[in-house]
Image (spheres, coloured by chain):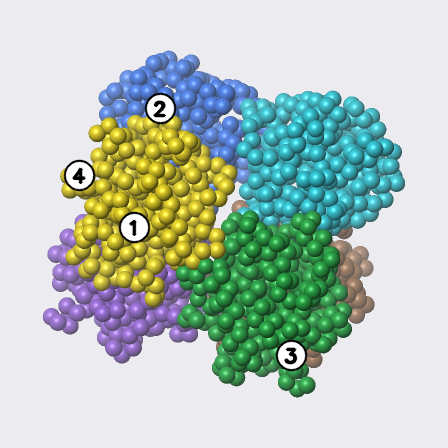
Chain colours: A blue, B purple, C yellow, D green, E brown, F cyan
Amino acid sequence: MEKIDETFMSFDKPYHQADIVYFGAPFDGTASFKKGAFFGPKAIREDSYGLETYSPYQDQDLETDTKVVDVGDLNFSGMGTEEVLDDINEFIEKIINDDKIPLMVGGEHLVSYPVVKALKENYPDLAVIHYDAHMDLRYDYEGDKLSHATVMRRIYESIDSRSIYQFGIRSGTREEFAFSKEKCHTHLFEVTGSEKLLDILRDRPVYITIDLDVLDPGIFSGTGTQEPGGVTFKELLDSIINLDGLNIVGADIVELAPNLDNSGVSTSCACKVVREMAIILSKSRRRRADG
Amino acid sequence: MEKIDETFMSFDKPYHQADIVYFGAPFDGTASFKKGAFFGPKAIREDSYGLETYSPYQDQDLETDTKVVDVGDLNFSGMGTEEVLDDINEFIEKIINDDKIPLMVGGEHLVSYPVVKALKENYPDLAVIHYDAHMDLRYDYEGDKLSHATVMRRIYESIDSRSIYQFGIRSGTREEFAFSKEKCHTHLFEVTGSEKLLDILRDRPVYITIDLDVLDPGIFSGTGTQEPGGVTFKELLDSIINLDGLNIVGADIVELAPNLDNSGVSTSCACKVVREMAIILSKSRRRRADG
Amino acid sequence: MEKIDETFMSFDKPYHQADIVYFGAPFDGTASFKKGAFFGPKAIREDSYGLETYSPYQDQDLETDTKVVDVGDLNFSGMGTEEVLDDINEFIEKIINDDKIPLMVGGEHLVSYPVVKALKENYPDLAVIHYDAHMDLRYDYEGDKLSHATVMRRIYESIDSRSIYQFGIRSGTREEFAFSKEKCHTHLFEVTGSEKLLDILRDRPVYITIDLDVLDPGIFSGTGTQEPGGVTFKELLDSIINLDGLNIVGADIVELAPNLDNSGVSTSCACKVVREMAIILSKSRRRRADG
Amino acid sequence: MEKIDETFMSFDKPYHQADIVYFGAPFDGTASFKKGAFFGPKAIREDSYGLETYSPYQDQDLETDTKVVDVGDLNFSGMGTEEVLDDINEFIEKIINDDKIPLMVGGEHLVSYPVVKALKENYPDLAVIHYDAHMDLRYDYEGDKLSHATVMRRIYESIDSRSIYQFGIRSGTREEFAFSKEKCHTHLFEVTGSEKLLDILRDRPVYITIDLDVLDPGIFSGTGTQEPGGVTFKELLDSIINLDGLNIVGADIVELAPNLDNSGVSTSCACKVVREMAIILSKSRRRRADG
Amino acid sequence: MEKIDETFMSFDKPYHQADIVYFGAPFDGTASFKKGAFFGPKAIREDSYGLETYSPYQDQDLETDTKVVDVGDLNFSGMGTEEVLDDINEFIEKIINDDKIPLMVGGEHLVSYPVVKALKENYPDLAVIHYDAHMDLRYDYEGDKLSHATVMRRIYESIDSRSIYQFGIRSGTREEFAFSKEKCHTHLFEVTGSEKLLDILRDRPVYITIDLDVLDPGIFSGTGTQEPGGVTFKELLDSIINLDGLNIVGADIVELAPNLDNSGVSTSCACKVVREMAIILSKSRRRRADG
Amino acid sequence: MEKIDETFMSFDKPYHQADIVYFGAPFDGTASFKKGAFFGPKAIREDSYGLETYSPYQDQDLETDTKVVDVGDLNFSGMGTEEVLDDINEFIEKIINDDKIPLMVGGEHLVSYPVVKALKENYPDLAVIHYDAHMDLRYDYEGDKLSHATVMRRIYESIDSRSIYQFGIRSGTREEFAFSKEKCHTHLFEVTGSEKLLDILRDRPVYITIDLDVLDPGIFSGTGTQEPGGVTFKELLDSIINLDGLNIVGADIVELAPNLDNSGVSTSCACKVVREMAIILSKSRRRRADG
């Protein structure tokens, strides 16, 4: 862990008392055109102090209703892609062993892969809910099997068939669309209907991965691959709050590249999604504890 | 009054013939993180020349259907916060004495307070319609009772109980949400339903204060405290045009910080809201004159 | 034709095999306040490589389902406005003679005029579908009859009466609104309802001109005259895809000024509209060939 | 002449009393890569109000020691390159006929050509002093004989041989360097030594053309073709003040593209050069009047 | 004092052990065109961590060779100009009473005035060394006697005649230049020759005020009134290091507006000047202690 | 090698005919604060087309007087730091085996290390000339021995003692300054005096590494660690042209982060240094061939 100057607002519980472990995965090594997801975790922490701790959407307050520890960023200094993924995998295993829930901010989307792999070890029945503008289902990308454009294919391979539930997808190759139609549950263009998963996934452990480019670039331009025609912030918020009730065992929020949005709005969005997700994870955890 | 180089487009009637007095209140003294509301009035004037004088939304034209005088900006040079508020208060009293309606552009939201105070003297039954992303109902903010974050609380104290009607609010402390629930009429998250006020406030003088950050930061990023999940420009426009029919005795449009939005879109929004509001005020005034 | 470094992605068929001719008209000579439409064609080409060739909206792929040739940009070096328009007119005549369909990217809106004039020669019954924030129906603008603000009036004069179908208009003078009411078919503020044109224009050749400022400036700020209250990207996409089924004999996409939007989102929007429009034109052409 | 909102600070003498006519030539039609000289005149006027009227370098004050009229910008609306040049030429003839001295701001460098041509008619012995990073001595540029890259060649052809005195040149083709060596008087890289011209050009009428990109792009980045290794602002100022004493019959300052420098420093430089040049022209004119 | 998140790098000695007190005066209330000096102190602190603690120019290290405490920023919340100045004055009196040396960062230049006034009480023979692009010697500015444009006049009135030594001045009114010639010691345009002050001011207590706009805007564009033709960073550094040997009883560094320079270079300059000045003050203090 | 769209202007000789191999090393993996050297090679290639092929400084033309092949960028996809360095090392060995001279553009400074190591194998007597603002002589940096801040220490260890000749250094720790004083030949602050190396290094093979941050950030702000007080572009150009005459066996130009300088000036500087360096290398090679 790198020393950090500050934590995400209110994520200041002692490690042993926390039930959620928040950390950053500042890796954007497979991006090559517009980069900057490396800077995501730092920007989110700094900007979090402009946010209220209270969520009127869920009537919960980070101060009083969550127990999250921000342990800082993983340090990938000098590492190649595989080493980075191993490092994340190992860190998640530790979190699971400590009986805590991981909440990760990227970094590029590839960092989701080792998290799912580690969780799958513990939760064989794991399902994955995937918000994204892009399929990310390529078998390889420019020859690489480990890429932001292949991450969901790798995740697909590591969990049970037809256990990926996609929302908001609006871009990919014809092959990816055919693949997803056959092998995933895909809601194109929109993020509505997520409340149906409460039934469908009722008995399964669930991982949520949110590539923030699912948002329309009018509100979220700070990302490497802008895709017009996305959803509004309200729609995304509604959709993920609808997931409250599931047994969520981990989540991530990826692909903020704050340097690509001078207005700062993209980072504001990311912060607010982190707040709401921390609350959802906390409620899920409490239910499990209470149950 | 400071000398001004130009006026807002078409707000060029002689003072004695005008029924609406447009002026700027370039004050952002209680902001400390992202500032710039000081520059709002100047930016709005300059940009107004890119706007048509005709509103297809209301089928009215600033040239032929309104009588507004732009008297420039109040000069707060050298003043502390209390002096600034006194200065505005005094200026509003003069406008009221001259039997005209004030239309103010800020500046930070705190400038609304002295306007309401002055109007309340004349209209004891005054109600306030409040568009905002934020409650602004704190009792104090970092020890200060006079702050952009406390302005609605001060306004609350200066008018009759339960006379504030809020729209679009999506951020605040748990205490502010509790306070508003008990003491105000609050429409969270949305600005729909304003047409119902035509009945509710039929017999009362009404002041309208629009903190432009009620808009989603996707369209309005030029403000100090961006809050994703806001309303669209169309929704805001519809909502305020729905207020046409009320007895409106004053209005303000605050919190544009043009320096924080390089694209210029935020200023375009502010200009268009000023145009529509000037038309609404003019129609209200004509009804009063005719009635 | 100027030498071009690259073509729009997949618009690489040989001229004689192509049925659609894509070209740029880099002219912004009548703009005087915020300029930059000159740079539109170049920006669109460069950015097109970030786009997928496959459209999930229409389930078509540029690679396999279209035959488009990008012939580069017309070279207006040294020319005045009239010469530019003549040059475009002549080029369109050649395209028509070669039995191909023109797909033009601007440049400012005035470049649409010579295209319509040339097509009208060949298709006497031509109708024009017009997406725009602005009427563009002035008789003259600051004394000029040839201007981005008069282009639809010139087009009106060159085709049969009441053959213009407008969508999304939200700005103009009172005179323009009166004119359009009497002489055009105008859908104010929204772009919904375009599917009705399938019936209305069933037997007529149709030209489509899209001034991208019909989009809300929250998503499309890179244009000279921003007009808040526009439509979303999804709404525009839906509206133009609804036109699939018409006999479309040409189209243009104008008024992207990429230099006015640092975020790059405006150019992303333009690219995606080009892709969808190329597919619609291709389907129209195939129907004609098959029919 | 277009209506202008404001004049350059203190250039407010009535036309008939002025001895110097200041005007803008907003033309950048032959530029194709990074444009923006069109916006130069407007930016200079607006920014001039941040400048003092007093020059400590020459101990003169624009208010009391110069008689300049700002007549606004020439209106090239709708014109091709040749028409623009004719228009400028004609305007200069009028200024000469009125016995006044032209001081022009560009616009791209090509606008200097018609000024020199007009002056040459009146002053057959005209010499030209040329500050620039670039030779601008190509015979043609991409086939065009009228281009920002050929302007000095056209000027060369229009005046007597070896009557061009160049300073600060640091870029061009091998052919241009050979041409200048044989046919011009060229000071490469530096602007020192201009004081020697007081002797050399003592008896001749002199025109001064300053392409501001002679300055290092560290201080002047707002121009289409940045060329590192330029001179400092002090060096340029010294060099042109050294010309005081010559019989200067006209001058221009070109190639400011204010949109390419967000910091505003380039425009500040241009304003200060305008001030100093107006003073030099005024002194030259007074000497002539007194002589 | 406001709570601060961090201190300027290495300015972390306990107050009672420090001999230099570093603090911020975030006030830009009299500026009205381009503002931002309010943000100076915060930007300097944050950026200081990119600086080495060791100065190769003076072969001293902040860690080992200085004893500075950063006490944060004065809190001017709600205050008018006079109150702000009184607040600074009072704070300086406390520093003097505690036998420490003040090192202030602005803020606009007006904040220097109350510092000099307080020091003058203690050091009746105080001389002031003034680096600036501007005279700042107006009697009043738009009617105000307390302004960034009048600060040196107020300082002049508060100390003995001809005790101001100016460097780098290149802008002002004719009256200011006349005043300075008669009443100050002024080195126009350049900052060379400061070493002569070692003799001239040998026996006097000295205050140094550095308006960073003395630097050329090519290196320092982040300030409200850019004035081309300034000195290089090296020249300024040499000039102030030449003052080492004087009995310096206080210093300030003002007019950084970090928001006006996106490149960040202006803040880098300010940080380095702070480092060198802290070392100079420390050496002066040690000499006094040793002497 | 990755596919490249274009080559650096005129670096288009076939590999087997070239005597200089130009390539990019897009690596910035050890930077963590302000990144972007990854984008250096691409930006330099694109911008090179704005440069003349003719150098008036050396009277040579890239077209006719050099034989350079641009082989594109090394592809470090997925690699950790050590792998990247090995990859570069191996590539340089191939260049040496093919009897060609490497000219590399970075990327961060660490990429120089494997080049020097490979050359040292072939030229046991290798000396290194080092332009930089920073010592880069730390033994480790935050625990890493392989870092942009340690690269010259690693280079020091890999060649003979006292074979590093430094210019322009103005930042580092006290320890680094002590180390360089004892073990290197260091010219602080300035880049003058390089012509003396013609004698000193007459009989030795020489490598030149230019960290462009040796330039003042006024002209070169596009780099991760800005250090005010640097040299001008002219001074750097003079200094490296003075090295013409040495037996230069390789060179690099590193640390351009084009994303950090919106004005584009930094990239213009880099391009011009590449041009001049290619000419110097070509002349050195010709002398060797002729000798």
Amino acid marked by disc 1:
Lys
Dot 3: chain letter: D
How many angstroms separate mark 3 from mark 1 (CA)?
57 Å
Q: Residues within 10 Å of mark 4 (few under 14, many from 20)?
A: few
- For label 3, the SS is helix
Question: Which three-letter amino acid code belongs to the residue tagged 4?
Answer: Arg
Which mark is in front, 3 or 4? 4
The residue singled out by tag 1 in the image is C117
Label 4, secondary structure: give it. loop
Question: Does residue F89 show up?
Answer: no
In this rendering, the label closer to the viewer, 3 or 1 = 1
Image quadrant occupied by the N terminus of chain A: top right
- Please state if C85 lies on the left or on the right of D49 as rendered: left
What's the CA distance linking mark 1 and mark 2? Answer: 39 Å
Instruction: Say which residue label 3 marks.
Output: D283
Which one is earlier in the sequence, the residue at label 4 or at label 1? 1
Q: CA distance from mark 3 to mark 4?
A: 75 Å
Q: Quadrant of the C terminus of chain A?
A: top left
Amino acid of disc 3: Lys
> Type of residue at label 2?
Arg
Out of F10 and F92, give the one closest to the viewer: F10
Q: Which residue does the numbered mark 2 point to in the structure image?
A: A174
Residues behind callouts 3 and 4 on a single chain? no
Do pointers 4 and 1 mark residues of a single chain? yes
Residue in the foreground of this view, choosing between A58 and D51: D51
Q: Is residue B18 above or below residue B57?
A: below
Image mark for residue C202: 4
In 3D space, how far apart are the residues under numbered discs 4 and 2 (Cα atoms)? 31 Å
